[in-house]
Image: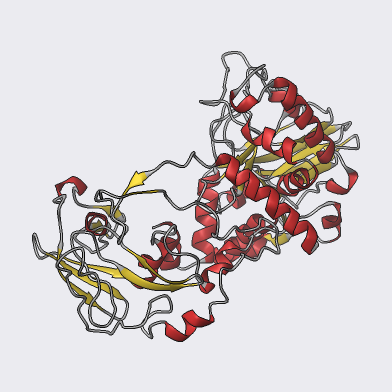
Amino acid sequence: MHSLTTVNKMNIRLERFCRAHRPITRTSQRLITTETTKPSTERITPPTASGTIIPDLSSSAKPREISDGKEAKQTTSKIHWALGEGYEVGGALKRGKGALDRHDEKGLPTWGDWGVPIKLEALGGPAVTTPPNFWLRDNCRCEKCVNQDTMQRAFDTFSIPQDIQPKEVRIEKDGLRITWANDDHVSSYKWDWLVKHRNKAAVSMFEQEKQELMDPYTYWDSNIASNPPSVHYDEIMADDKGVGAWTAKIRQYGFCYVDGCPVSPEKTQELLERISFIRVTHYGGFYDFTADLTMKDTAYTNLALPAHTDTTYFTDPAGLQMFHLLSHTEGEGGASLLVDGFKAAQTLLKESYSAYEILSKTPISWHASGNEGITITPAKKMPVLNFQDLKDGEVPRLMQVRWNNDDRGVVALGEDDGMGAEKWYKAAAKWDEILERKDMEYWAQLKPGRPLIFDNWRVLHGRSSFTGKRRICGGYINHDDYVSRWRNTNYTRDEALAQIL
């Protein structure tokens, strides 16, 4: 665990990093009393990040609160925890007659061509979010608008009148019910959904949302050797509950062993396919190989391999990788190495902010070209550290480590933002030094009957040199398919859909 001082220092550096990635502030035009995009004659400047909540990437992250939320608890509606007071089940929201008629006698916002405002109580106090009418109609989830078998939109978005307005807006226990004026179509929107998709620049965080910002990962170092995560083969093969336990540990730690697996390539393939289909690459699909250089790659030798991630040369690198040692005869060595890439990135950020920034911004070419007829490289150059989408007021969350110095192409002498080879080499040397620290390395000998699976976007792997003949089987799984399987074996169908819709 980080000390409070260390966490605070990391927050400051992360806020600087976030500001460095934020687009230049531009003035824009909008109505000053709502969130609609309808132009106004008054020019204002979009809100800055100051005063917003910045989550920490450490495992002990606690969002900085604007207020203690006590006032919100005293005034929120009994219908839903996020609503302001005044909402009553069965009641109708009033239509506003114009720009000066924006609240009814209860203080609830009125609707009109500007949208359907909703009064909320967040940590920052009372606020209003105003989803536009067109946006609401486009996101109707009724059986007529969404094919319930495929969950795909079943109507033409662009047939909606641009000036569409409600005929009636009613308050229900579960959400808002809107009858549309143009065709009397009825749409229902759950309160949870409306809160999730609010304009977060206008409405700050809620107490109930803090948990979502907690870091889901357990970072580890060499001490993980005393208790590495594992799940039994029988549990995984029995039902989806076992798959859920397995994928949950992979997501938390970035790797997991499977105990009690039959020493068989066929059974290993069946095990891997409990998560998803096996990804086919130029190496094939499910692999079963020895160190015979069948493929022109150092993985097919008995040489030592430093910590790296696989398939850096794909636009979408492999998500999960499994290794199952079936046999090792007439020799010794070949211990497996794992390094928590996210832990290493945290260490880099703490020790050298500039190196962290350089490895996050400098695009690098990667390639696979050892085999005849194969010259693979990503659709565009990609940096070592890659992040999730930036959200206003939040620091970027690390999503993927892409590192294999053996597969790296040429670092350009000059790149945007002053980046280039000279700076990159210094930053990469610092990163490499962190990866090779003894306290960062987890070494273990693979054993028949105990496959290892790991997240190739997070955990770097390697091995020591070996003698004799080793037979290993395994394969890749796409990252999106793995995350989907994790989500659907750890949450109900409705909960899983709510995470992505």
Residue 112 drawn at (x, y percent)? 18, 64
Query: Residue 7: x, y in percent?
Result: 74, 58
Residue 410 or residue 246, whichever sits in front: 410
User: As displayed, is residue 289 above or below residue 391?
Assistant: above
Residue name at image x 22 percent, y 54 percent? 134
User: Where on the picture, by quarter, is residue 334?
Assistant: top right
Q: Is residue 399 left or right of residue 228?
A: left
Q: Is residue 235 visible?
A: yes
Is residue 2 among the parts visible in the rendering?
no
Q: How many marks?
A: 0
Query: Who is closer to the viewer here, 438 or 55?
Result: 55
Outermost residue, front direction? 42
Which residue is at the front of the view, 111 or 438? 111
Left or right, 194 with reference to 97: right
Q: Give the image location of residue 183, x and y in percent.
A: 8, 61
Question: Quarter of the image holding residue 332?
Answer: top right
396 and 480: which one is in front? 396
Which colour style is shown? secondary structure
**Could you tell me which residue is drawn at 39 percent across and 72 percent down?**
120
Q: In this view, does 489 lie above or below 340?
A: below
The residue furthest top is: 372
Asked if residue 27 is positioned above or below residue 418 in the image, the reply reads below
Q: In this view, does 49 lie above or below 311?
A: below
Q: Position of residue 335 (x, y in %)?
A: 85, 41
Quadrant containing the C terminus is: bottom left
At 28% from the left edge and 57% from the top edge, which residue is drawn?
139
- Residue located 21% across and 48% down the image: 157
**Residue 109 as seen in the image, left or right of residue 387:** left
Figure quadrant of the N terminus: bottom right
